[in-house]
Amino acid sequence: MAGIIQAKGIRKSYKYQQGLLPIIDIDNWSAESGDAIALLGPSGSGKSTFLHLLGGVLPVDQGKLEVAGHDVSAMKESERDSYRSSAVGYVFQDFYLIPSLTVKQNVELVMPKTMNKSERTKLMDEWFERVGLQDRMNQLPSRLSRGQQQRAAIIRAMINKPPIVLADEPTGSLDFETGSSVMRLLLDMSRENGSTLITVTHDLHLAELFPVKLQFAEINSCLKGQQGRDASAALAAASPLKAAASGGWRS
Ligand SMILES: Nc1ncnc2c1ncn2[C@@H]1O[C@H](COP(=O)(O)OP(=O)(O)OP(=O)(O)O)[C@@H](O)[C@H]1O
């Protein structure tokens, strides 16, 4: 199956002082179903904004954006909300687990109301065991390590098997070893679910785990120029070994 994401002529600007600051200008880009893409680029280049467009958090200003059979660019805000809850799994750098709920309750919140209690419990038991958190599922997030919290957040993003998973620097607040195992889990789960995964990362060593590495400057015309070329050159020059030795390259 081809073209699970198709972006044609999409543009996004933010209000800036008296005018508009163009952030995204993508002429033509698509991703195949099941792709696992590391999205790379300098800080401030619009990577999070791009994820927000794909996830329907923000509306595009112009152009056509189709994701998993949905014309996201034609949706009203309420339609984007329901698209996001049915078709998109989001993983954030800071997890965003609700602190007053156990990690199991955090996951249960996103599960379909049509599923009965015993089905929900069985499914959650399987997933928590899969990520090695079966003994922790009834604890509050604050009782878990950061890596464990991210594992729970990954379950929340993926338990409904969304066709698209968007991860915005999912290892950005973890040490290298923990981040590496979290990134592998994200990749394995996406593969098992058949989801298309787009992950923003500044860590070139972890980016090497992904079959596709995409420099944002290659598709975003707003970045044509020095910034993008520097980032591409840095990517080409940095071997995983060098990146690991330096603690991971950051743009
Ligand atoms: N809500 C907003 N209003 C105005 N400007 C914004 C808004 N959100 C982001 N920006 C600006 O848009 C640009 C792109 O931001 P974005 O967060 O998408 O970049 P990024 O590539 O994800 O950066 P980083 O790697 O540092 O997270 C930045 O210059 C940022 O300051």
Image (tube, rainbow, N blue to C red):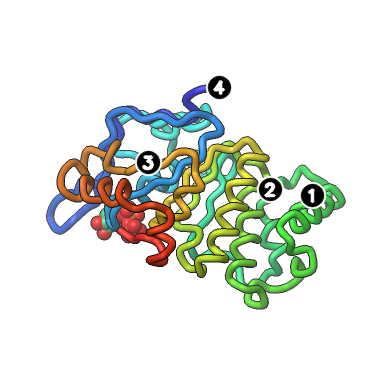
Give the mark toward the camera: 1 or 3. 3
Q: Residue beneath label 4, please? A: 1
Q: Residue beneath label 1, please? A: 123
**Mark 1, other Cα within 10 Å: few <14 / some 14–19 / many ≥20:** some
- Kind of residue sitting beneath label 4: Met
Q: Element under label 1?
A: helix
Residue at the extreme bottom = 143
In terms of sequence position, does the residue under pointer 1 or pointer 3 come before the other? 1
Q: Element under label 4?
A: loop
Q: Element under label 3?
A: strand
- Kind of residue sitting beneath label 1: Leu
Q: Quadrant of the N terminus?
A: top right
Image location of residue 144, percent across then percent down: 66, 73
Q: Residue beneath label 2, please? A: 159
Q: Are marks 4 and 1 in contact (CB under 8 Å)?
A: no
In terms of sequence position, does the residue under pointer 2 or pointer 4 come before the other? 4
Give the mark toward the camera: 4 or 1. 4
In terms of sequence position, does the residue under pointer 2 or pointer 1 come before the other? 1
Ligand 1: which quarter?
bottom left
